[in-house]
């Protein structure tokens, strides 16, 4: 399978509706990006959990998932499960971030996610950023909303295991959930790996990619 590599990637925007969304959906990708690009600028914006213990978890987790990065984390206080009623606040937060950075890549939820907060954030992304590669990550959940992704980031076994370890280490508030375990995270990564010819992978959805076949350089 032929891989495509974005040129000149030096800034990433990482968006989550809730604390731990980014780590679940794209934790391995963040580890891979930061390992290969020391000093990478990562601007992370999370819409809910601000001012609670979950914010503390998120800040520590993202520092671990983005080693060596120039990391900025913002955690807002929008109420969980109420994004449609706080559309303007979410849109303004994205616009404020847009004014501060020119990312080469955006990591965000995907539009087919069954959770209204995830889906709402995904719908806002193209209204704020145009012409930027945006990858929609997936979050396994009770709703059974996993789709058919078209973009894959292979993960070596060490990175896949590191993702699981960091999830367990940094989000103790979530350990009571019956699905929040090693089997869930590695199981999905193994399935996505099968789909792209790797041992493990994270998978993403994207709405539009433009390729350039004019040059052989």
Image (cartoon, rainbow, N blue to C red):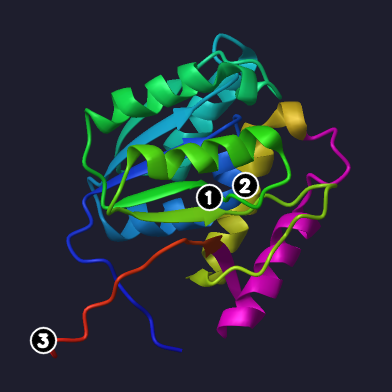
Depth order, front residue of 176/84: 84
Give the residue displayed 52% in from the left and 53% down from the top. 136
Residue 120: mark in rendering: none
Name the spot of residue 178 as percent of width and height, x first: 88, 42
**Outermost residue toward the right in this view:** 178
Name the spot of residue 176 as percent of width and height, x first: 85, 33
Locate residue 67: give its quadrant: top left
Depth order, front residue of 108/66: 108
Look at the numbered discs 2 and 3 and tell me whether their residues touch, using CB distance below 8 Å: no
As helix, strand or loop, the secondary structure at mark 2 comes to helix
Residue 217: mark in rendering: 3
Q: Please tell me whether residue 97 belongs to the stretch shown in magenta.
A: no
Locate residue 98: give its quadrant: top left
Magenta span? 175-203
User: What's the CA distance linking mark 2 and mark 3?
Assistant: 36 Å
Name the spot of residue 96 as percent of width and height, x first: 30, 23
Mark with earlier residue (3, 1): 1
Q: Is residue 43 above or below residue 3?
A: above
Residue 27: mark in rendering: 1
Q: Quadrant of the C terminus?
A: bottom left
As helix, strand or loop, the secondary structure at mark 1 comes to helix
- The reply to whether residue 154 is in sight is yes
Locate residue 18: give its quadrant: top right
For label 2, the residue is: 24
Look at the numbered discs 1 and 2 and tell me whether their residues touch, using CB distance below 8 Å: yes
Q: How busy is the neighbourhood of tag 1: few (under 14 within 10 Å), some, or many (20 plus)?
A: many
- The reply to whether residue 198 is in sight is no
Name the spot of residue 132 as percent of width and height, x first: 30, 53
Give the residue displayed 67% in from the left and 49% down from the top. 139
Give the residue displayed 47% in from the left and 61% down from the top. 206
Mark with earlier residue (2, 3): 2
């Amino acid at each position: 399978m032929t891989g495509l590599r974005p040129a000149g990637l030096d800034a990433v925007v990482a968006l989550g509706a809730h604390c731990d969304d980014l780590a679940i959906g794209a934790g391995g990708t963040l580890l891979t990006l930061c390992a290969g690009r020391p000093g990478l600028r990562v601007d992370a914006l999370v819409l809910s959990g601000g001012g609670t213990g979950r914010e503390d978890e998120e800040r520590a987790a993202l520092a671990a998932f983005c080693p060596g990065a120039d990391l900025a984390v913002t955690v807002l206080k929008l109420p969980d499960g109420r994004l449609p009623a706080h559309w303007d606040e979410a849109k303004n937060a994205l616009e404020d971030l847009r004014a501060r950075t020119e990312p080469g890549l955006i990591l965000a939820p995907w539009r087919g996610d069954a959770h209204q907060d995830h889906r709402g954030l995904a719908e806002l992304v193209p209204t704020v950023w145009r012409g930027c590669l945006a990858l929609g990550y997936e979050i396994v959940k009770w709703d059974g909303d996993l789709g058919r992704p078209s973009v894959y980031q292979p993960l070596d076994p060490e990175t896949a295991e590191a993702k699981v370890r960091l999830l367990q280490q940094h989000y103790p508030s979530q350990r009571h959930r019956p699905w929040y375990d090693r089997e869930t995270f590695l199981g999905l990564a193994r399935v996505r790996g099968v789909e792209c010819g790797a041992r493990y992978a994270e998978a993403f959805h994207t709405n539009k990619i433009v390729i350039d076949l004019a040059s052989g350089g």
